Every structure is written in C-alpha cells, then in structure tokens.
Image: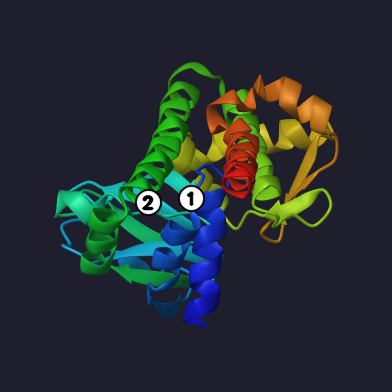
Amino acid sequence: MPDQAVATFLRKLRQHSALSSREERALARLRPHLVEAARGADLVRQGDRPDVSIFLLRGMLARYHTLAEGERQYLALHIAGDLPDLQSLFLGAMDHSLVALDQVQIACFKHDALCRLIEDEPQVGIALWRQTLLDAAIFREAITNIGLRKPVERLAHVLCEQFVRAQAADICEENSCSFPLTQTQLGQLLAMSLVSVSRALARLRRDRSMELRDGRLTVLDWKKLKARAGFDPTYLHLDLRAAAGGTRRSGARSRRDG
C-alpha cells in the first residue's frame, strides 16, 4: 500500500534526521506508486532521464556501469530502506544503471512532488541530502576496499558491510541475511576474477567465519570475519540514529515546556 510505503520512507529519514510534526505530515502527503520487478530487471538504465526517484521496500538492487564492449562493473548494493537514485532528482540523465538482484518491490516518488516538498519544507531537503551523503561514504569505502585490500579481505569486508547494514535495517534473521549475488556478480562488484572469488570464498569457509548458500549470508563467527576484513563500521554513520532520536526527544520536551 502507498501509505505503508510512505510510512517506511519516513522511518528511514528518522533514523538520521530529526523532523518536526509539520514536516512529517508533509511527507505523509506523498503518493508514490508501487512496482514489483523480477531478478535481472533494469529499473533505470544508463542515459535514462527518469521523472521518479526509487525507494526500495523489499529485495536487493545494484548500481552498475556498462562499457561499450558490454563489460559490467557493479558500483553499490542497495537493500530495503535505501534510496538508490535520489541524485536523479537534480542530475538529469543517469550515468549508471539500476538492476534487481532478486525479486524487489519499490516505491516511485515523482520528482515534481519531491521538489515541491523540498521547497515547502527545507529540513526535509536536508534529510534527503544527508541520505545521499551516507551513500557517498559507502562509495568511498568501496573504492578503498577494491584498491587496497587483498581478495580475501576484500570479500570479507563487503560481507561485513552487508550484514551490519541488514541488521540496522532490521531485515536479518538471527545471524543470517539475504545476499543473492552469484560468484560472477561478486567478481564484477569487487574487481576479482571468478577464480579469485572462488578461492576467497573457500578461504572464508575454511575459517568457519561465514557461509554463503542459496542467496543467503550466514555469519558463523562475527569476530573472526570482522578481523579478517579489518572492518570498522564508522563510515556507515550508524551513530546518527541515536543522535536523531535524541534530537527528536529534546524537541518534544521543548515543545511541552513551551
């Protein structure tokens, strides 16, 4: 239902930004349309000029570049609660594509409705901007991961990142989360050959730190996997969740005291 999609969208922004009741009511008036897409479907293609921005409700999406020869480089993974193409609101033509890695459900917010909302409620615009900054932080870490880490550590790092992000989004089942990438797609994400991906997976399995099977990641030993990756979640800025909550509580007290 569109109302549920808007409520989920609002909860996402609340994780890192304090919004007033007026701003939340303005957000609640948005009316997205919902779309289901199958694994492998392109939701946006390089060169498109979309008039909507996507909010992912279920499943996993990936951004990717394609060269003229057809070679693909995955740039980022997106899970439920992400806004993977918010930049299309201001950039016009898309410089990358967006594909479904499994069955997905998305909410599409019209650009003109989002622009009116930002004009009327600038703090909502700041919240959306903050969301793009969080995405940019993940991009920066991905560059470092591909450029400096060895294959086993590189794979371990992206698995740690996805697990921690899934926990933050409340879509884990105990020590397991969805991870529907094939080994070929992992190679295209991490700039590794298929042989290197296979060897790195085998090494992590020998460590008994994780298992990757049937589209799910199971963390068997978090401390061991985290140590192997040299994983530090600071770049995910999960501390903003607590900061936003504290700001909302302070604001509520101020309004009561006033």
Residue 210, given in percent of the width and then of the height, sits at 78, 40
Q: Residue at x 41, y 39 (%)?
A: 130
Q: Residue at x 56, y 20 (%)?
A: 150
Identified by mark 1, the residue type is: Leu
Dividing the picture into quadrants, the one containing residue 103 is bottom right
Res 19 label: 1
Q: Residue at x 60, y 34 (%)?
A: 243
Res 124 label: 2
Q: Is residue 117 left or right of residue 130?
A: left
Give the spatial CA distance, label 2 vs label 1. Answer: 7 Å
Identified by mark 2, the residue type is: Val
Kindly indicate whether the residue at mark 1 contacts the one at mark 2 (C-beta within 8 angstroms). Answer: yes
Q: Is residue 63 left or right of residue 96?
A: right
Marks counted in the figure total: 2
Residue 115, given in percent of the width and then of the height, sits at 23, 59
* Vertical arrangement, residue 236 with respect to residue 52, above or below: above
Q: Residues within 10 Å of mark 1 (few under 14, many from 20)?
A: many
Q: Residue at x 34, y 67 (%)?
A: 42
